[in-house]
Structures are given as C-alpha cells and as structure tokens.
Image (tube, grey):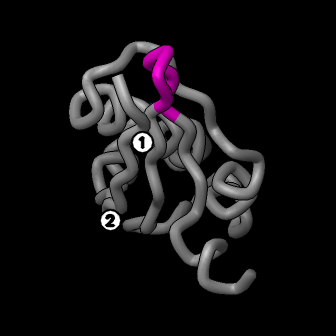
Amino acid sequence: MSEQERIYTVPLKEAWNAQRYRRSERAITVLKSFVKRHMKSEKVVLDPLVNETIWARGIKSPPHKIRVKLVKDSEGVVTITLAEAEKKE
C-alpha cells in the first residue's frame, strides 16, 4: 500500500452539542471519528499543533471547523496535521 494524502475541512459543530466544559474534548473525539470514517483506519496520530489549535480558545469554545491534512502510511497509521502549516514552511 502506498502513502495516501488528503486535505479535509472537518466540521466540528457536533462538539457544540456537548456540555460547555467538555466541548474541546468532544471536538477531538469528533475529529478522530471523522478521520477513521474517511481514511478507513483505526490507528490515528494527532499532531500537537492540531491539538493546540482546538484548545487555543479554551475548553468552552473550540473552532466550528478545522482544515487538516491527513497522511496514511503503508502500515495504516493516519497522521493528522494542519493544512495551513504546510503553506507557511
């Protein structure tokens, strides 16, 4: 299997249905479930920069959507990074 690379805008609106003090935690869960569904893999690795972006405004107000780059390697592990981070370098 060769390496797959995709860029998605993931809607995190579902996280806003959670209790106010658990929204960022729920946003991480929504992001990981989106990746598992679209990349067909159970192994997901979250980049610390993505985590910091979701938690940047605190636990109560995560972003409504986030643009990420997903890379699936030959072993089936999907790595989630920010899509905008690639443009800056």
Which mark is on residue 43?
Answer: none
Left or right: where does residue 14 sit relative to residue 28? Answer: left
Residue drawn at point x = 40 percent, y = 14 percent: 42
Residue 30, above or below 36:
below
Left or right: where does residue 42 sit relative to residue 46? Answer: left
- Considering the numbered disc 1 on the image, is that residue within a helix, a strand or a loop? helix
Instruction: Identify residue for label 2.
Output: 9
Question: Was residue 10 drawn as part of the magenta stretch in this picture?
Answer: no
Tell me the amino acid under the disc marked 2. Answer: Thr
Residue 89, above or below 20:
below
Q: CA distance from mark 2 to mark 1?
A: 10 Å
Tell me the amino acid under the disc marked 1. Answer: Leu
Question: Was residue 75 drawn as part of the magenta stretch in this picture?
Answer: yes
Instruction: Identify residue for label 1.
Output: 31
Start and end of the magenta stretch?
73-78
Q: Which numbered disc flags the more N-terminal residue, 2 or 1?
A: 2
The residue lying toward the viewer, choosing from 68 and 51, is 68
Residue 73, above or below 82:
above
- Where does the image place residue 5, in percent across and percent down from the top left? 39, 50
- Where does the image place residue 53, in percent across and percent down from the top left? 67, 63
